[in-house]
Each structure stands twice: as C-alpha cells, then as structure tokens.
Amino acid sequence: MAVTKTVPPERVNEAIDSGICLLGENRVQEFLEKYDSYRKEGVDIHFIGHLQTNKVRQIIDKVSLIHSVDSLRLAQEIEKQAAARGLHMDVLVEVNIGGEESKSGVSPEELEPLLLEIAKFPHISVKGLMTIPPVCENAAEIAHYFAKMQQLFIDMKQKNMDNMNMSILSMGMSKDYKIAIQHGSTLIRIGTAMFGDRK
C-alpha cells in the first residue's frame, strides 16, 4: 500500500501510473481535498488513520476498507452510515499490541469481545487486524511485537467467528516492513520509502 499522507495528488497519480493500485489515507480532511484529483480507475483506497465517529459519513462511500476500528462505538457508526447508503463496509480491528497510552487500538484482551459484537452487524465484515508497534531500538524488539500480533491473528482466525474472514494482517511500514512480512503481515504500509520524507 502507498501511504499518501502529505503527498500532493499529482505525485500520487504518478505512483498510480507506475502501477500502484492501493492507496492508504490517514486524514479525513486531507483525503477529501485530494479525492477528486486522483485517477481512481482500478485503484482501491483504504482509510488507515484514526477515525472519529463524526467523520465516518464523509468517507464511507469513498473507501473500500477501514483499518482503524478501535471501539464498539466506531463500529456502530460505520454500521449506521453503511446501512443508510445501502453499502457493505470491510474493516480491520486495530490492536494496541504495545499497550501504549498514546496510541489507539484495543488491547489483546479486549479484542475477542469486540470482534463478537462487531460480528452482529449486517453491513460490516471484519477482514482482519491492524497494528502499529511501539518505536523500538532494535530489530529483535520489533520482531517481538510482530510475533505477538501474528499469534493473536492466528488465534482469532482459528475461532471461526461468524461474519469474519480473517485474511488480512496489516502491519509494517517503511523501516520495518521486512520484519513484519517475516511475521505474517499480508499488507504493508509504505510512505517514506516510496515518496521520501514528509514535509
């Protein structure tokens, strides 16, 4: 996935012309400002940033997957907005694997109860999990968090819950994507390595 935060639309379109077909958007306002400028044919757009409930209606018909469901309240709003438009929304549940107070996401202990609640919604399908690990000093530390996340993903997959297809494990960014892939990541988020440092 090409992460397009702060990248102007013309550069994003260059990436699309070069074969990129999956974009990740972090900020609702910036996304809405750029949306009409994108060459969208054959391109999927995911919303990967923290999503406030009052912004769901602004993006629900513009993205194919929301990565950052971290509460029942947010899931309820996605269900409400999807139902109102006759849509079906795929989501990932965000896990705060490092237990950091500064990060959103549910704790590993809260994950299964939340999944069971979301499974009841007819207009939402859970496709997997997402995480952003803590900033680590070395590869072994990062690998520890990715391994924990991989095991959690496997555990949830084996439970065969209704209305769930645990096929996506979204973790890994420009600096750690190789380690993430080694630990089962199926979707990596590349921004800096593709577009350069953010302004």
Image: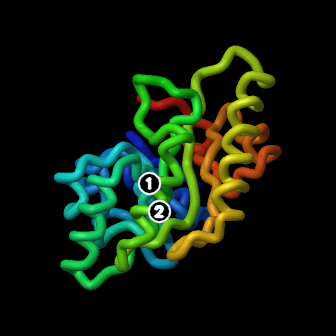
Residue in front for this viewpoint, 195 or 109: 109
Amino acid at circle 2: Leu
Q: How many marks?
A: 2
Q: Which mark is residue 77?
A: none
Q: Which residue of the protein is positioned furthest toward the top in this rendering? A: 137
At horizontal 48% and vertical 44% (from top left) the residue drawn is 110
**Crowding near the residue tagged with mark 1, few <14, some 14–19, many ≥20 C-alpha atoms within 10 Å:** some
Q: Is residue 75 above or below residue 182?
A: below
What SS does tag 1 mark?
helix
Q: What is the x, y in percent for residue 91?
A: 45, 63
Residue in front for this viewpoint, 109 or 190: 109
Residue in front for this viewpoint, 7 or 25: 25
Q: What is the x, y in percent for residue 134?
A: 58, 25
Mark 2 sits on what residue? 116
Residue 147 lies left or right of residue 55; in this view the side is right
- The answer to whether the residue labelled 2 contacts the one labelled 1, judged by CB atoms less than 8 Å apart, is yes
Q: Is residue 34 above or below residue 198?
A: below
Q: Which mark is residue 114?
A: 1
Which quadrant is the C terminus positioned in? Answer: top left
